[in-house]
Amino acid sequence: MRRKTFWKFVGPSVALMLFFIAAPLVAVLWQSFFLSVPVVQSVEVETCSPGFPSQTCVTELKSRPVLDENGRPVTNTAFVGLQLYNAVVQPETVWQALKTGDYEAILRIDFWRALRFTLTFTFVTLPLVLSIGLAIALAVNNAAPKVRGPVIFVSLLPYIITPVIGGISIYWLFVGDGIATRLIEAVIDRNIAVMTMGWAVEALMMFYRVWHVAPFAFVIFYAGLQGVNRDTLESAMIDGASRFERLRYVIIPHLMPLIIFVTLIHLMDSYRVFEEVVAFNAQSQRISLQWLTYDFLQPDDSGNRSIGRASASSILTMIGIVIILFPVLRRTWRDHKS
Amino acid sequence: MLKTITVAFALSLMAGGSALAACAYENKVPIKAITSAFPAYEVIAAKMKECGNVQVELDQEVRTKSAPALAANPALYHISSVHNGTIVPLINEDTIRPLDDLVAKFGQDLNPNQLIKIDGKIVAIAFMVNMQHLMYRKDIFDDLGLEVPATYDDLLAVAEKIKAAGIVDYPLGATFKADWNIGIDFVNLFVGYGGEFVNADNTPAINSEAGLKTLEMMKKLAEYMDPEYLVADATFVQQQFQQKKIAMSNFWASRAAKMDDAAESQVVGLIGTAAAPAAVAGGIPAVMFSWDGFAIAKNISDEEAEAAFRVALEGGDQEMVEENNDLAIWLINGYKPGEMAKGAIDTMQKGAKPNPSTTWRGLITDAIEKNVVEYMTGKKTAEQTLEAIEAGYTTSAREAGLL
């Protein structure tokens, strides 16, 4: 392709990416180092509100932002260095905890609590998604052609359902007197409350993610299986390779690029876990990094929100994704070069 | 084809005509409003629309939307529903209009109690008040010969007796959901124990005797609840009542009407109300009440402001109250407090305080919510919780310029 033609095709998409992805990213980075603080004054205010039988009025000192001539709050924006990152990560508290050996104190900080859960979530679901996806693909590949269509359709269903909806329906099975809880209660013959147990909520969220994403891995692997070299397989059989050995030495090496692809996508997606926390109402037990950012962004009743800390937390999330993707990307790069 | 269109047009005119009939006048200026989405506002919105040219968005997230929408020029809505908390950013950013001239012109039927005044200027019109107060199963209390508890210690004793009798699944319900819900329960008790949230210079003061007592009481109360209380929002507790799973709760007055809704409730006529219990014997009820009403945007023309004000008044007029008397604790003239309103009125008469409309309030409630949840799940001790609330508040108060 000529260079000019190449840019004609790629140009628009690069421009859009610069505008809609790169520019906001720079803005977020900027916001995480600069803090806008409204200028506030103390004023005495009389407030009258309803009472029975008649109104009550109170006079008290209140902090009010100073407004400029256009009626907009006056703010001071200043470079604050790593102050916002410090507020999220709280390194002094962590250092203290490490010195005194009180490791639980670290998990009492939202960021570290979220990081702990996010990492566990990512690395527990990854092998499960890969192995279950591969297992379904192999099963479908070996199934009679007649049942293949329906089996593929059924296996894909969990992936089609919107994550929040799917999550809520599993949540309902277990919350309070849900059907699943009732069944477990009938078996073990005592009352249980699933949502009060942090580990159970965590396990349910992981179960849901695996159930939801395994079909994606399945589809990719199933497509890959169609390209396995028949001759190699047959010669392996003649050499006396067992079913497992054929899988280990012929099929998996053939699927390796796809396995790496699914791994990349899954690492990125699950490091940004969010829907599960919302659907399972899990914030009292477990929070994720993405949820933390969202929480900083939510305004409270008086309209305050911490954009700065939200930006810092999302930059940290991005750095985290780069770190966990690094080994996989390096491997791909090396394979590519050799 | 033409005929169908003509007929449709005629029908729509008739429909429009009959709808207009309920409004005292015909509104000519297009008006947009955003309000909360609970039942009382549904009724008010319907009434406002009857005046014609009115568009109302009922939105659960009005608290996060109204401030930026009214700050725009021209404002995106003419009318926004407000309460003690949500009026703070509107006042701070000066985006709502003083209403004194409009009240003088159109507000003859308003009850003086409805006028929310800040610095002598009327800034909002309240329709109703809302708060949590005691709701209990009259039949269970009669059967067991129990007294309605006046303090939280009495409440624990009563809960113990109900638990021993084994009539319901759990003696107690509470809106302890791990978000703003549980924050309100903390705030209520904290005020009941005489706590102060911040000092005069906006530094936190929550790490106090009152704070410790509040947390202790919350743990004690939780022992009598459904163990999954951290997912219990108002609808959850309402259903616990309706399905006879709990015997009492310090619960929202705005939900009282639902208890007697035969379509969904098994406890019609069985629920009694009383003042919110006090935290200390002889003290004020451990609860803060809110008013809920409307404000008019500043960044609109005088003509629009006048039309918006009239429409909003039509929404909350005496006729509306007469038709929906038990839907809320109305402040509007013509309201006849029913059986279910007893608890709310008692609570106010015993000296319950209104929620403060201040900037620090939102910040500290936010810090309270998060940390109290971790106290309830056992991740933090009471001392650690109070320290963490102060630390969280201090960080966000610095960012908000309060410190």
Image (cartoon, rainbow, N blue to C red):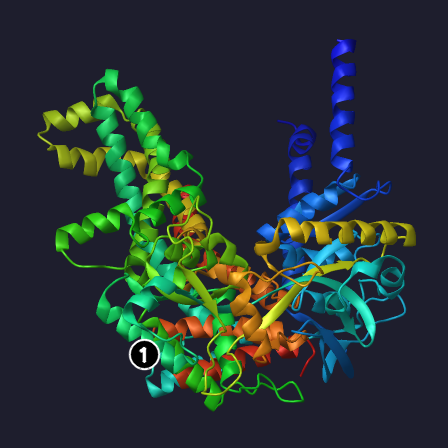
Instruction: Give the vertical position of B199 relative to B326 (above or below).
Output: below
Left or right: residue B3 versus residue B303 is: left
Question: Is residue A56 visible from the viewing direction of this image?
Answer: yes
Q: Which residue is mark 1?
A: B157
Residue A253 or A192: which is nearer the viewer? Answer: A192
Left or right: residue A295 versus residue B69 is: left
Q: Label 1 neighbourhood size at 10 Å, few (<14), some (14-19), many (20+)? A: few
Residue extending farthest left: A240
Please tell me whether mark 1 sits on a helix, a strand or a loop.
helix
Residue B269 or B377: which is nearer the viewer? Answer: B269
Instruction: Give the vertical position of B325 relative to A250 (above or below).
Output: below
Picture coordinates of residue A60, whole percent (x, y): 72, 84
Residue B222 or A195: which is nearer the viewer? Answer: B222
The quarter of the picture where the N terminus of chain A appears is top right
Picture coordinates of residue B115, whole percent (x, y): 76, 67
Picture coordinates of residue A170, whole percent (x, y): 34, 46
Q: Quadrant of residue A85?
A: bottom right
Q: Quadrant of residue A300?
A: bottom right
Picture coordinates of residue B230, whole percent (x, y): 39, 64
Identified at 42% across, 51% down, the residue is A279
Left or right: residue A31 versus residue A244 is: right
Q: Which amino acid type corresponds to the residue marked 1 in the rendered image?
A: Ala
Identified at 72% across, 60% down, the residue is B333
Instruction: Give the vertical position of B58 relative to A282 (above or below).
Output: above
